[in-house]
Amino acid sequence: MSIDVDALSIDIKSGSGSGLGTISVFGNTLAGIMFDVTQNTVNLMNIRLSLAGFLTLTIPNLTVNLKNSESIKAVLKTLSC
């Protein structure tokens, strides 16, 4: 199993950052993601979840407004299904 962080940039002063990475097992990529974080939002892009290469879930863009607790609850409810 390997966790590869291909790029990571964090600015502690402004509270923002971005990055991308993958999780692989025996050469098969199980998950991949790109993200941007600000003080107000978390934006996840190109989320890829794969099971042995034959079942793949791709989410092009998921944005969570951290100032709005209802949006966080909606995302958590969706992900718990």
Image (tube, rainbow, N blue to C red):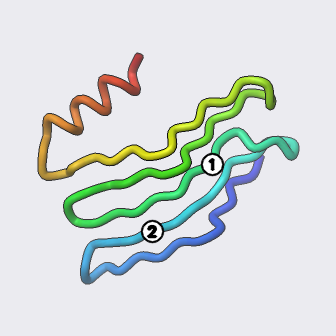
Whole-percent x, y for residue 43 in the image: 37, 54
Quarter-wise, where is residue 16 in the image?
A: bottom left
Residue shown at the point (68%, 54%) measured from the top left: 3
How far across and how far down the image is residue 28, in percent?
82, 41
Q: State the CA–CA distance, disc 2 to disc 1.
A: 14 Å
Mark sitting on residue 10 = none
Q: Amino acid at mark 2?
A: Ser
Q: Amino acid at mark 1?
A: Gly
Label 1: few (<14), some (14–19) or many (≥20) C-alpha neighbours in 10 Å: many
The residue indicated by pointer 2 is 18
Give the labeled residue for mark 1. 32
Where on the picture, by quarter, is residue 77?
A: top left
Q: Residue at 27% across / 73% down in the picture?
A: 15
Image quadrant in which the C terminus is located: top left
**Residue at the outermost right position:** 26
- Location of residue 55 in the rendering, given as x and y in whole percent from the top left corner: 72, 24
Q: Residue at x 79, y 25 (%)?
A: 54
Q: Is residue 2 left or right of residue 78?
A: right
Q: Residue 70 in the image: x percent, y percent?
A: 14, 34
Q: Earlier in the sequence, mark 2 or mark 1?
A: 2
Work out whether 7 lies above or below 69: below
- SS for dot 2: strand
Residue 25 falls in image quadrant:
top right
Instruction: List the single residue furthest toward the top.
Output: 81
Work out whether 2 lies above or below 59: below
Q: Are marks 2 and 1 in contact (CB under 8 Å)?
A: no
Question: Would you call the spot at circle 2 few (<14 residues within 10 Å), some (14-19), or many (20 or more)?
Answer: some
Residue placed furthest toward the front: 60
